[in-house]
């Protein structure tokens, strides 16, 4: 098939007519616009600056930056929504426990996989000791929880949630190698000993000091209330 080209425009008639009918298709294509501006600058020479071309480059840079920020916001919103769904499923798992033993046994076997972590352990100081604690509870000497929380930190408040790289001091608690950990202090009241919920992850980026703690705080509050209810049963 032979196609006759328009010698003036350098385009076949069909393409030329389509561009004349809808020139917006060029404006919407950044690569085409960049090529047109570059051709224009080459035509006018090096001694003349095309302000329109420079303005378009600046607008493109700004648009790229805005698109990047937009994508980051969407990704953060998705992560928040996904994290909330994970915590909600774990909370339901806590509420479904039948008694204290079932509650404690479910932490490592069921709740930890729901939270997508490797370890989930309850630490209780031994004095005063809570009677009939399940075997999976880590019983520590008095003052041990304070030493665990203070490891690697400067003067933390007692109710702080600690996010950090895994510390050697908590290795016996996890019972396996983890890369990052979250420590959730639990206030069980004056009649009960000091307690701590310890989470461990093989992902070094999972629990970092700069991360938010709202979802973990919510999970810790629910855990505390369920634990107190099971202790009273």
Image: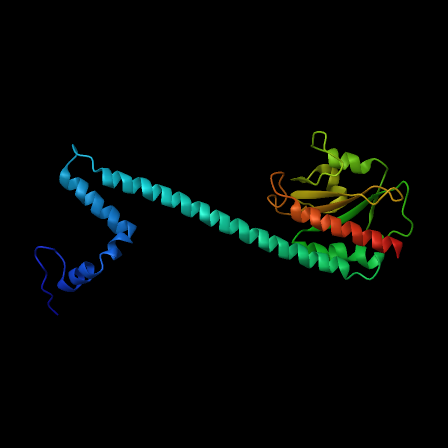
Quadrant placement of the N terminus: bottom left
Q: Residue at x 74, y 40 (%)?
A: 170
Q: Quadrant of residue 233?
A: bottom right
Which of the two residues, 198 or 89, is positioned nearer the viewer here? 89
Q: Quadrant of residue 3?
A: bottom left
How is the structure coloured here?
rainbow
Which of the two residues, 51 or 135, is positioned nearer the viewer here? 51
Question: How far across and down, in percent of the image, does residue 47 sit?
Answer: 16, 32
Which residue in the rendered view is the most extreme toward the top? 154
Left or right: 13 in relation to 161: left
Left or right: 60 in relation to 212: left
Question: How far across and down, in percent of the image, does residue 30 sit?
Answer: 29, 50
Question: How far across and down, in percent of the image, does residue 59 sit?
Answer: 32, 42
Left or right: 146 in relation to 43: right
39 is higher (above) or lower (below) than 82:
above
29 is higher (above) or lower (below) than 55:
below
Q: How many marks?
A: 0
Q: Residue at x 61, y 53 (%)?
A: 83
Q: Residue at x 17, y 40 (%)?
A: 42
Which residue in the rendered view is the most extreme toward the bottom? 1
């Amino acid at each position: 098939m032979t196609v006759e080209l328009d010698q003036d425009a350098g385009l076949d008639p069909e393409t030329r007519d389509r561009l004349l009918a809808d020139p917006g298709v060029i404006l919407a294509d950044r690569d085409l616009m960049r090529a047109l501006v570059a051709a224009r600058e080459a035509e006018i020479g090096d001694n003349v600056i095309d302000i329109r071309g420079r303005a378009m480059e600046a607008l493109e840079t700004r648009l790229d930056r805005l698109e990047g920020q937009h994508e980051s916001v969407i990704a953060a919103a998705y992560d928040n929504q996904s994290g909330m769904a994970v915590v909600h499923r774990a909370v339901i798992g806590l509420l479904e426990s039948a008694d204290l033993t079932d509650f404690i046994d479910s932490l490592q076997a069921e709740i930890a996989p729901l939270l997508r972590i490797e370890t989930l352990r309850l630490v209780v100081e031994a004095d005063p000791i809570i009677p009939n604690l399940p075997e999976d509870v880590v019983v520590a000497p008095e003052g041990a929880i304070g030493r665990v929380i203070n490891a690697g930190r400067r003067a933390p408040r007692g109710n702080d949630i600690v996010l950090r790289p895994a510390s050697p001091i908590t290795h016996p608690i996890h019972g396996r190698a983890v890369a990052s950990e979250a420590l959730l202090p639990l206030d069980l009241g004056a009649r009960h000993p000091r307690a701590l919920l310890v989470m461990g992850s093989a992902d070094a980026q999972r629990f970092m000091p700069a991360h938010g703690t709202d979802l973990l705080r919510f999970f810790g509050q629910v855990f505390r209330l369920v634990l107190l209810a099971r202790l009273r049963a």
